[in-house]
Amino acid sequence: MKPTLTQADPIESLILVDAIQRSGIGHHYRDEIHTILTHYYVKTPRDSSSSSTIHDVALSFRLLRQQGHHVSAEVFNNFKGQDGKFRGEVRQDIAGLLELYEATQLGFEGENILVEAEDFSSKLLRKCAEEIEYSKWSRHINMRLKHPCHMTITRFTETNNFLVRSDLRGSAVNSWEKPLMKLARVELLMAKPIYQEELLQVHKWWDGLGLTKELKLARNQPLKWYTWSMTALINDIRLSKQRIELTKSIAFVYLIDDIFDLYGTPDELAIFTEAVDKWDYAAIDMLPEYMKMSYKALLDTTNKIARMIFEKHGHNPINTLKETWASLCKAFSVEAKWFAGGDLPRAEEYLANGKVSSGVHVVLVHLFYILGLSGTQNQGAILLEQNSTLISSVAAILRLSDDLGSAKDEQQNGKDGSYIEYYMRDNHGVSFKQAREHVINMIASEWKLLNKECFEINHYSPTLSFYREACLNLARMVPLMYSYDDNQRLPILEEYIDFMLLKPKSIKQIKN
């Protein structure tokens, strides 16, 4: 099935593109989607919104902006009356309100019309979801409010939703909808055994290191670590080796975090940080016994990844890779000193350091090189900087979302900081609820910065665009990784892993 541009009704072509992308199979149709959206962008007048519905304008805005086309958010002012408020027909269009809400998720900083539109659409949709008149659509409305497609893994959240969207639009079911649903299911069924084999390889590697025998309190979560990599590179099933190697770097971020959080004394941690900075096997002798195996495994694994990249792509990034590990350990050291000495930081100081200690910089730099990109290119060098918008925003989203969580990782018992705690200390009289709301707004602001950066990357090479999508996928995974319930479990993450990876098999069956 190939998407084509319907000359009589180009909006139907956009609806098809949207459905393909939501189903998780858009990577099979990159060229066709590019052609459709470029043709629509070139042929459709920018002022055509005056004769279009809010659904059509919002859908085209979202698809064109995420493709990298310049579209102004001011187009939504055309749906306001003289009083500056959205007109009555917009308020009564449920399908249009859903598309408007989805479109606002691609906003940039300073686009106040999108902030207003998000507030307007979300309030009306929540009200509709509670009314009997819309009861058959309430579950769909709530799902899209909680999981807008730009900020989620749509292959997981959009299962079986095509038919509901047609019903909401008041249109007949398209002839392509059921075949598309079937194709998406076949795609997942074909991918599962590949993911399961990759997970098996990760387990064999991790178990072979024997580190959890030495460090029994450290987290032993290969499935969780692999899920990050699987999702980051979900758009190309051929990248098995890359997913496995990326998981290894993620595993060491968790391991070193536990060494700092659960094991080391301040003096021991200072020695470990110095050893990582040296990046020399001879430094093993200066380490406490329980750190030696982990240090050697870190060097062995990272050096091997660098050699693999050199053999495949012709450049050796080891100097850059080891610098990321040194920066991570220094950030962990800063936190360890804060918590050990009781000299707690201000909220902004904590966040600046926390973005580094999140490990995002380590992971995204490794991902960059694992994908075969070169840091010698001007744009590549900028993207790899620790304070680049791309890395900084993903890191802030992760760190702040982690702090918003209602519980720590159930297997981690060490002492962690919290932006919420420090923000309340810095701003006397601010309640816990107000601090949480502030953090939620900060995450929204970071998404706007990330949106703008990803929009700019769209105009660079296709390979960088793939890297951009992988970074977005990591940000999209954050809510799944930190949405703890009252029992300190992660039910949404567990459901996602079952859907993408395990069912009908269990993890025990895969390992055996």
Image (cartoon, helix red, strand yellow):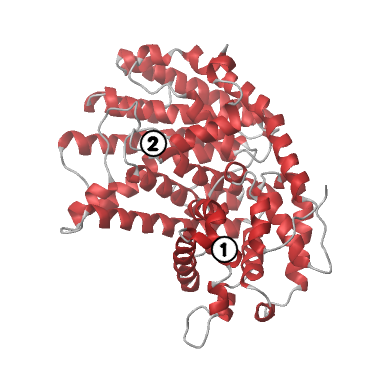
Query: Is 448 above or below relative to 471?
Result: below
Q: Residue at x 36, y 21 (%)?
A: 218
Q: Residue furthest bottom?
A: 82
Q: Earlier in the sequence, mark 2 or mark 1?
A: 1
Q: Mark on residue 219?
A: none
Find residue 123 and report its image quarter: bottom left
All told, the count of numbered labels is 2
Image coordinates of residue 289 in percent, x first then y, are 31, 12
**Which amino acid type is shown beneath numbered disc 1?**
Ala
**Residue ID for mark 1:** 103
Within 10 Å of disc 2 (Cα), the crowding (few <14, some 14-19, many 20+) is many
Residue at image coords 51%, 34%: 495
In-image side of 72 versus 398 (left or right)? right
Q: Amino acid at mark 2?
A: Leu
Q: Residue at x 57, y 65 (%)?
A: 94
Query: Which marked residue is nearer to the observer: mark 2 or mark 1?
Result: 1
Q: CA distance from mark 2 to mark 1?
A: 36 Å
* Element assignment for label 1: helix
> Whole-percent x and y of residue 401?
38, 46
Between 125 and 220, the one nearer to me in the picture:
125
Residue at image x 44%, y 27%?
Answer: 252
* Residue receiving disc 2: 328
Q: Quadrant of the C terminus?
A: top right
Tell whether 340 sits left or right of 252: left
Viewer-proximal residue, 203 or 276?
203
Relative height, residue 182 to residue 19 (above, below): above
Closer-to-camera residue (241/429): 429
| Mark 1 crowd level (few <14, some 14–19, many ≥20, 10 Å Cα) | many
Q: Is residue 319 visible?
A: no
